[in-house]
Image (spheres, rainbow, N blue to C red):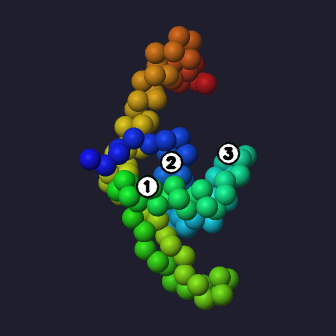
Amino acid sequence: MKETKLGEFEEVLLLLVGILEEDAYAFKIAEEFEAQSGRSASIGSVHSTLDRLKEKGFLTSEMGQPTAERGGRRKRIYTITNVGRNALQASRDFKVNLWNQYPGLAIDKLNILGL
């Protein structure tokens, strides 16, 4: 059986693929990771994580059109699968459930307070 759990970095990259949509290629994902998190990620770690997410069935990829900015080379564009969306939903639900059990920091309570 394939692993269906997401590690933290896997989860973030999967979310970034969804955010970037048709611009979800490795270099852009790495740039967006740094912009969103303030931390850098090597292109090698991004590539290996994207490959792992594909093996788990959370992503598919296809080659985009050649671009002049890349000297005629094509980009590998990633897309989230339904299995990937389900994994993200399960991960979010799990974390929200835990946050809601944390006294004083429950997400529902913070939302009511407008925080």
Tell me how far mark 1 sits from mark 2, CA to CA.
Answer: 7 Å
Neighbours of disc 2 within 10 Å: few (<14), some (14-19), many (20+): some
* Disc assigned to residue 37: 3
Q: Amino acid at mark 2?
A: Glu
Q: Neighbour class for label 3 at 10 Å: few (<14), some, many (≥20)? A: few
Q: Which mark is residue 53?
A: 1
Image coords of residue 60 (percent x, y): 39, 64
| Callout 1 amino acid | Leu
Q: Earlier in the sequence, mark 1 or mark 3?
A: 3
Q: Position of 10 compared to 72: left or right?
A: left
Using the image, tell me which numbered label, if any, was put on residue 10.
2
Query: What's the distance in space between the residues labelled 1 and 3, CA to CA?
Result: 20 Å
Quarter of the figure with the C terminus: top right
Q: Which element is circle 2 on?
A: helix
Residue at point 26%, 47% (across, down)? 1
Most extreme residue toward the top, as rendered? 103
Residue 39 position in % (x across, y down): 71, 47
For residue 112, say whether it is visible. no
- Distance of mark 2 from mark 3, alpha carbons? 14 Å
